[in-house]
Amino acid sequence: KNEVEQSPQNLTAQEGEFITINCSYSVGISALHWLQQHPGGGIVSLFMLSSGKKKHGRLIATINIQEKHSSLHITASHPRDSAVYICAGYGGSQGNLIFGKGTKLSVKP
Amino acid sequence: DTEVTQTPKHLVMGMTNKKSLKCEQHMGHRAMYWYKQKAKKPPELMFVYSYEKLSINESVPSRFSPECPNSSLLNLHLHALQPEDSALYLCASSQPTRSYEQYFGPGTRLTVT
């Protein structure tokens, strides 16, 4: 069965702190998607990766295929980073997304 | 243009009403998806259209009826909904021959009274 697990479920940080959100996935997941959702809002794609590392501004995503593990890092966190971050894996012939339960991040000023 | 648009943003409907949600993309994607998201939960897949043909129906009740009139447009027709159907309905699209990366729309917030 394809599964995606995220940790932590909730995370509170002070502005400026370095943040890491972790995601583990099962065999059958071919690529991972990191998504961001602000309260009451739609979903924004941050990264999709199947190997290595990607960086965009203060966000960095890494994936270790052997260990089936991915991390999302936020450097110099800011209150506007407060959102739910969702890890989702692609598995299945239709490219279906299997979602993790999300990590709710609150960054305090 | 990497945008998926959805209309309306908000919809309030009674249990006897018939309404439709609309999703549009102009990225040339040939797969389109409907998801339902309840509060504090991840999205749940409802339907997948691939090359304008329904390829996945995740046992969704018949009061939800999807339609894909052309490769850019996806509709979700709603009829006789229940209050528990109140949720955020998200549309997404992807290009099946490439990376499967899905692009999401902003969603329609549906309230059934």
Image (spheres, coloured by chain):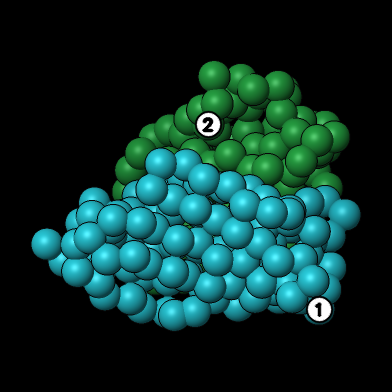
Chain colours: A cyan, B green
In the rendered view, does A15 fall on the left or right side of B84? left
**Chain of the residue displaying label 1:** A
- Residue located at (82% from left, 51% from top): A94
Q: In 3D space, how far apart are the residues under numbered discs 2 and 1 (Cα atoms)?
A: 30 Å
Q: Which of the 4 quarters of the picture holds residue B98? A: top right
Q: Is residue B87 left or right of residue B77?
A: left
At 51% from the left and 28% from the top, the residue drawn is: B3
**Image position of B65 with respect to A70: above or below:** above
**In the structure shown, which secondary structural element does the residue marked by tag 1 occupy?**
loop
In x, y percent, where is residue A26?
76, 76
Which quarter of the figure is the N terminus of chain B placed in? top right
Which residue is located at x 73 percent, y 54 percent?
A51
- On screen, residue A58 versus residue A79, left or right, reads right
Mark 2: amino acid: Val
**In the depicted view, which residue is nearer to us: B60 or B94?**
B94
How crowded pointer 2 is (Cα within 10 Å; few <14, some 14-19, many 20+) is rated as many
Location of residue B50 in the rendering, given as x and y in whole percent from the top left corner:
81, 38
Find residue B4 and report its horizontal and vertical position in percent.
Answer: 53, 31
Q: Which residue is mark 1?
A: A1
What count of labels does the image hold? 2
Asked whether residue B83 is in view, the answer is: no
- Taking B8 as reference, is A92 left or right? right
Q: Which residue is mark 2?
A: B4
Q: Amino acid at mark 1?
A: Lys
Percent coordinates x, y for residue B45 in the rendering: 64, 59
